[in-house]
């Protein structure tokens, strides 16, 4: 089995994924870091110097490399399942359980406002109101993709341990 975590930026994919992988004794792949290592640049540098189209192409190539892993937990980037044939590529792997970490817009704004500098899509937004409007529109476009997951966990009000427990209960 391989667990693939998806959801908007700031939904906790990396934190939850790392914890799950330890409990299950699975390999953990933080997909943004995997891409950074492949290219030898940080995500925000890739966007700045090569542009988003280049990033999305590299993201697709890297996804092809990791999606066949067995006994792994993979925390994807927020946009990964939303481009090209990426969702199809993930879902055609029979060993994959796709998990959506679903957070409300207000929670995402609170979490992302202080950490937007490393995230090129939102780093230019100056106020919480601007961030709220951006996420509202963006999530409206992306949610139909996220909703195609096998398991959806509503994370609002839950601790990291609660989310991990809830995923494990649905899996076993
Ligand atoms: C992106 C999310 C980021 C990263 C890149 C683009 C997106 O990952 O892949 O900045 O399109 O939502 P996180 O969700 O891990 O922040």
Image (tube, rainbow, N blue to C red):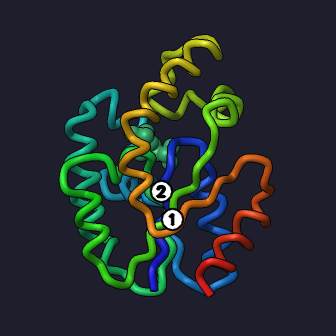
Labelled pair 1, 2 in contact (Cβ < 8 Å): yes
Q: Position of residue 124 (x, y in %)?
A: 48, 16
The residue drawn where x is 25% and y is 44% is 56
Left or right of 56: which side holds 115? right
CA distance for labels 1 and 2: 6 Å
**Drawn side of residue 69 relative to residue 26, left or right:** left
Image quadrant where residue 111 sits: top right
Q: What residue appears at the point 37 percent right and 84 percent down from the top-left corner?
A: 95
- Sequence-earlier tag: 1 or 2: 2
Q: Is residue 7 visible?
A: yes
What element does badge 2 sit on?
Answer: strand
Task: Identify the image quadrant of the N terminus.
Answer: bottom left
Residue at which label 2 appears: 6
Question: Measuring 30% from the left and 51% from the top, which residue is drawn there?
Answer: 39
Residue assigned mark 1: 99
1, 44: nearer the viewer: 1
Q: Locate the C terminus and report the quarter of the image it occupies.
A: bottom right
Name which residue lies at 29% across and 78% down.
Answer: 93
Examine the rendered structure and indicate whether residue 33 appears above or below residue 91.
above
């Amino acid at each position: 089995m391989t667990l693939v975590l998806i959801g908007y930026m700031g939904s906790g994919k990396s934190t939850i994924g790392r914890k799950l992988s330890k409990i299950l004794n699975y390999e953990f792949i933080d997909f943004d870091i995997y891409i950074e290592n492949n290219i030898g640049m940080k995500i925000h540098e890739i966007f700045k110097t090569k542009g988003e189209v280049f990033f999305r192409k590299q993201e697709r190539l890297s996804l092809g490399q990791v999606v066949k892993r067995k006994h792994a937990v993979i925390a994807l980037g927020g946009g990964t399942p939303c481009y090209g044939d990426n969702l199809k590529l993930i879902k055609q792997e029979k060993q994959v359980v796709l998990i959506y970490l679903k957070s409300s817009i207000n929670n995402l704004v609170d979490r992302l406002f202080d950490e937007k500098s490393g995230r090129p899509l939102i780093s230019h937004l100056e106020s919480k109101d601007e961030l709220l409007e951006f996420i509202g529109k963006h999530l409206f476009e992306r949610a139909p993709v996220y909703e195609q997951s096998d398991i959806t966990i509503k994370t609002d009000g839950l601790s990291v341990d609660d989310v991990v427990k809830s995923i494990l209960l649905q899996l076993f």
